[in-house]
Image: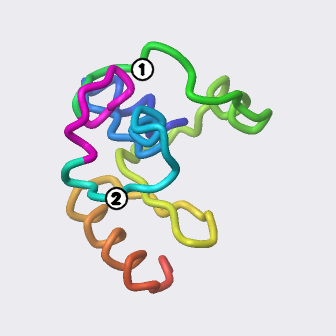
Amino acid sequence: AAVIFNRLRRNMRLEVDATLLYALGRQRFIDFARDKKVDSPYNTYRCYGLPPGPICNPGLDSIRAVLSPAQVGYLYYVAQANGVHVFAYTYAEHRENCRRVREGQSSG
């Protein structure tokens, strides 16, 4: 939740894959470069701010995270195959984390 709050405070696009997949009506990207151009208020790669409504029912952990977000300065994250997220302060760090995740390396 902290990353989302931090991005909103800086008027950055949220760029959340889950909202884009919701807009596309599927669970996987086919052509990410093309997919992220879809015209939808749920496409947080194009639109600023929060989408117009929820994309799912949040779990208790998600609700707790929003009510009491971690006090960190992270602006980026990427999920590893095991579901663990790797966080970054800068876009350069994020790109490196993405490369490592794609190559299956430990976030370490």
Using residue 4 as the reference point, say whether residue 97 is left or right of it. left
Residue span colored magenta:
35-45
Which residue is more in the foreground, 86 or 71? 86
Q: Residues within 10 Å of mark 1 (few under 14, many from 20)?
A: some
The residue closer to the viewer here, 16 or 106, is 16
Which mark is on residue 51? Answer: 1
Residue 25 in the image, given as x and y percentages of width and height = 47, 38
Q: Residue at x 33, y 23 (%)?
A: 9
Give residue 81's position: percent from left, percent from top.
56, 72
Q: Earlier in the sequence, mark 1 or mark 2?
A: 2
Residue 68 part of the magenta-drawn span? no
Viewer-side label of 1, 2 = 2
Rendered residue at 31%/24% (across/down): 40
x then y, percent, for residue 42:
39, 26
Predominant secondary structure in magenta?
loop
Q: What residue is at 54 percent from the left and 60 percent from the top?
A: 85
- Asked whether, in this view, residue 58 is left or right of residue 39, the answer is right
Q: Is residue 38 magenta?
A: yes
Left or right, 92 with reference to 16: left
Helix, strand or loop status at disc 1: loop
Residue identifier under label 2: 30
User: Eyeballing the image, is 8 above or below 71?
Assistant: above
In the picture shown, does residue 21 fall above or below 107?
A: above
Task: Please tell me which residue is depicted at 41% across the width and 46% down the height of the picture.
Answer: 17
Type of amino acid at the residue the image marks with label 2? Ile
* C-alpha separation, residue under disc 1 versus residue under disc 2: 22 Å
Q: Secondary structure at mark 2?
A: loop
The image quarter containing residue 90 is bottom left
Q: x%, y% of residue 5?
A: 44, 29
Q: Is 9 situated above or below 19?
A: above
